[in-house]
Each structure stands twice: as structure tokens, then as C-alpha cells.
Image (tube, rainbow, N blue to C red):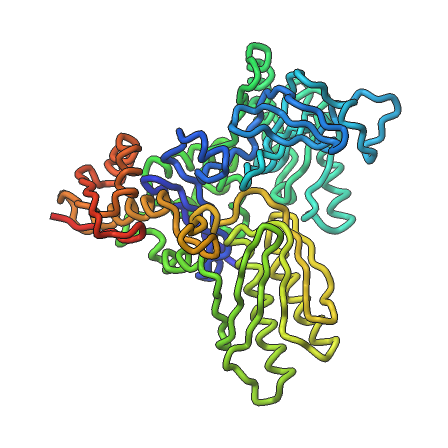
Amino acid sequence: MPKEVLINVGAGEIRVALVEDGRLQELALERTIGLDDGAARAQGRSGHSIVGNIILGRVQRVLPGMQAAFVDVGLDRAGFLGAREARCLADLPGFEEERTPKIGDCVHEGEEILVQVVKDPIGEKGARLSANVTIPGRLAVLVPNQPGIALSRRIEGDDERARMMAMGEQMIAQGGDRLVPGAGYILRTAATDAALNDLKEDAERLAEAWRPVLAKRQAATAPATLYHDLDPVERTLRDMVRADTVRVVIDDAASVEAARAYCRRAMPEAESHIELFDGPGQLFDMYELEEEIDRLTSPRVPLPSGGWITIESTEALTAVDVNSGSFTASTGLEETSVKVNIEAADEIGRQVRLRGIGGLIVVDFIHLSEARNVAEVIDVLAQSISKDHTPTQISPMSEFGLVEITRKRVRDPLFKLMSECCRSCSGQGRKRTRDSIALEVMRRVERAAAAAPGKAVVVRASAEVVRWLDDHGEEVKGALARRGAPRVRFEANDGYAREGFDVATG
């Protein structure tokens, strides 16, 4: 189905929405203000992802009992490096790739090693690391420490996989000294539509990105970040834009030019799909996305029939309960259960993606008596989950109607990014964080300034929200000025609770 990518380059946050047939399917948030707050970043609370960064770290501790090491990567908490992720550092005779060596054979305390962040810090856990560093391109992923060709799991069919393997080997054979000596490549799904020359050019760009990493390593002292992944706009083009993407709409002129420049370098076929949004209204108003994003922190999700699902997360797992509500099919209880369960199965995959839920997810479906109905519900759930790029597995339905889903954790889920435990309710409830309210204030300022060009904007909000805005004053006012709101005044008002504020022009 045709897809659209909408990129809102706001004053304090870049938001990316993938829309299919007018319906939100994927959402990514990356904050661009307040990143100097080291504690927030280390806790995974700033909204700034460090996944993909390549860092020269120093091994702090080696724990044979855990078969892991803790590595200083310059954050408040050390990163975690498991033996499996460190095995490329082992120098063992007859070493087999499928066998995991002991962590002591891979690293030693005090040693400087090159690692890559594969999971952001989540909760009280530090970043998850891998010593098998990679650099992703549009068509291929460079793997400097592992020679050979591998394929994305999404490339299916024996004939197609054989064709892609042959093209990858031909690319290496013809690349010569323009490629990284001894390196391997993982061919991405986008490579299936590419010609050999396109693949070679992508590999050459990856070599150009890798050589400065090696040069910096020679002069750097651990901990030091040697490589940052692309910025959010370019990363979106690389990872989300496919042949079925009909347009990419961006609401910032400078970002449009940067996007077009990236396309000219890496994916010229996509440049014609990039459009500048200049109103009327705001970009996400096109499909009423603001209201839907606000609902993503609510536990209850309505279904078309009148039933609903309830999503509740704990430290151990996320529970999803399916409820038929007042809906009753005229043909009986089993038909009622089938209809509501199918609607829920279709929605669950979408909600898991949008909310960024990871780890163990347990779904309590309404009881079904017939095996064919169970199979149909599982098929719909599998189809919904299959749209996810994050590795996910589904178990069969138990006799109690329970289905277990495991989804790889990469970063904090949306509800942790946007809310925090409420102390006044003993941790049983949540409230929105101060910075998420401040970012909403900034979006409202942009909207007000666009509706009344040239007029000053006055914001009245709680003292803690105004304090956050004042603490990042230069960043906030500079970003708002670039977004058409150069005259803004913030006033603290004790009459407002954290979530309350007012934006006016005059």
C-alpha cells in the first residue's frame, strides 16, 4: 500500500510519522534540546538515541560469573558487553563462530576496545554494547570485523537469496582498494531492487565513513565517541523510505535541502518524492496525528466494534487485555469473541510499534472454542507484527487464551519517555514529565506564531515548566525563532499544575 513519511522538525524535537492509507503506522521521536543534561541522557530520558554510535571505551570490570564486562563509554553508567557480543575480539585457535568464548578470552580490565551502542540506556541499565561494530548504508551494512556476505532476514525465497549472495560477492571482488580490506557486508532489503553499480557505490560510501573512525582511534583516549549515526532526517530517508513511499513531507526548508542533498549522494531515485510543507496549519494536522500521539500514553485503546484493549506495563512484562465491552454479535458468543479478537490482534501489532514496547508482552484474548478461530486470530496477529522492523517472536495461544510476544528492547518505551511515576499516588500512577510538557508548549508557540505572524507570544505555565524553558533559554528561543516565533515571553504562574499552560498572542 502507498506510504507517506511526515517529518516534523519542531523547535525542540524531530518527530517522524509513517502513514499508510491515512493511518499512523510508525512513530519516532528525537529531542534536539536539553541534550547537555548528562544525567538525563545516561538514564535514557532525554529522548536522544545513541544507538549506532561507535565509541573507544575502556574495560572497567570483567565478570566471569556473568560472562560479561562493563565498559566505560563516557556515560554516567558503564555499558554492558556480553561474551557473545565480544567474541570477535577472541583470538582462539579453531574458534567457531557459533561457539561463545569465555569473556576473559575476549577482553581484559583496563583494555581500550572499540564498541558500538546497540541498545540505549533503559531505566537503571547502562547501554548495551557490541564489539562487532557496523556502519549501515542505504543498501548494505559494513561489518569491518567479519568477512563475507550475509542477507537481511526479510529477503525471502531461495532463488532471490542466491542471486543477492552472488551480487554481494561480485561487489567485493570488483571493489578492490576502494572498499575496506577484509570487511563483510549485510545486504539490506532495499538492495533487492538495486543494480550492482548501486551496491558498489553504497559500499564505497561506507568505506569513506569507516576510514575516519580508524584515524580517530589512533589519536583518541578512552572514552571517546568516534562515530555518530546520521541525523534523524537522513536516518529516516535511509531506513524508512522504500519503493512504495509516495512522498516525504518535511515542514522545515533547511531540512528539505539537507534531505535532497543526502538523496543526491545516496538514493537519487527518492529526491523527487521530497516535498516542503508550508501550511495551511501544521504538518501533523494532515491526518490528525497530534490527537493520536496524545492517546499513545493512555492504557485504553478502542476497537471499531466497541470493544477495547488495555495495555499495562511493569518491570517484568507488558500485559494486554482484550475486552468486548457491550458488543455482541447476533450469531452468538463465539462469533463475538472472534470479531473482537481479530480487531485486537490487528491493533496490537500497531500499538506495540507506536509505543516502542519491548521485552515480554502477554496478550489475554477472549476465550475461543474452535481451533480454526484460534488459528485465524494468530494469523492476523502475525501479519500485524510482521510490519515491525524490530525482531519479534510470537508463541502459540495457550488453552487459557494467552499469547506471549517477545520484542527486542532497543530504547525506552514511549510512556517512559513522556511520563514518570507519580509520588503522590505511591508509584501506582504516572504523570507527564516536565520536559514533555515544555516541548508541547513549544509546539503550541509555533502554532500560535503561524496563526498570527509578527505578533509576540506569551506563555503562562507552571513554575517548573518555565524553569526548564529558562534553563535552556538560548536553545529554546533560537529554535523558536527559526520556526517563526522570534518574540516569546515565558511567565511562571502558581495557578497552573504541571500539565496546565496557556499560550496567547498580543
**Which residue sits at x=56%, y=10%?**
219
Q: Is residue 186 left or right of residue 260?
A: right
Q: Is residue 247 visible?
A: no
- The one nearer the camera, 107 or 426, is 426
Q: How far from the left and from the top, in percent, is residue 37?
A: 41, 31
Q: Is residue 244 above or below residue 206?
A: below
Marks counted in the figure total: 0
Residue furthest out toward the left:
506
Image quadrant of residue 102? top right
Residue at 26% across, 41% down: 466
Direction from residue 454 to residue 202 in the image, left or right: right
Q: Is residue 87 left or right of residue 122?
A: right
Could you tell me residue 254's position as x and y percent? 34, 35
Residue 499 position within the rendered picture, expressed as x and y whole percent measured from the top left: 31, 52
Which residue, as the protein is rendered here, is positioned at the far top?
Answer: 219
Q: Eyeballing the image, is 407 above or below 146? A: below
Is residue 77 shown above or below 322? above
Name the residue at 49% across, 41% down.
237
**Residue 355 appears in the figure:** yes
Q: Residue furthest right?
A: 94
Q: Is residue 401 left or right of residue 38?
A: right
| Residue 456 drawn at (x, y percent) | 14, 43
In this rendering, the answer to whether 229 lies above or below 320 is: above
Residue at point 41% right, 45% down?
A: 15
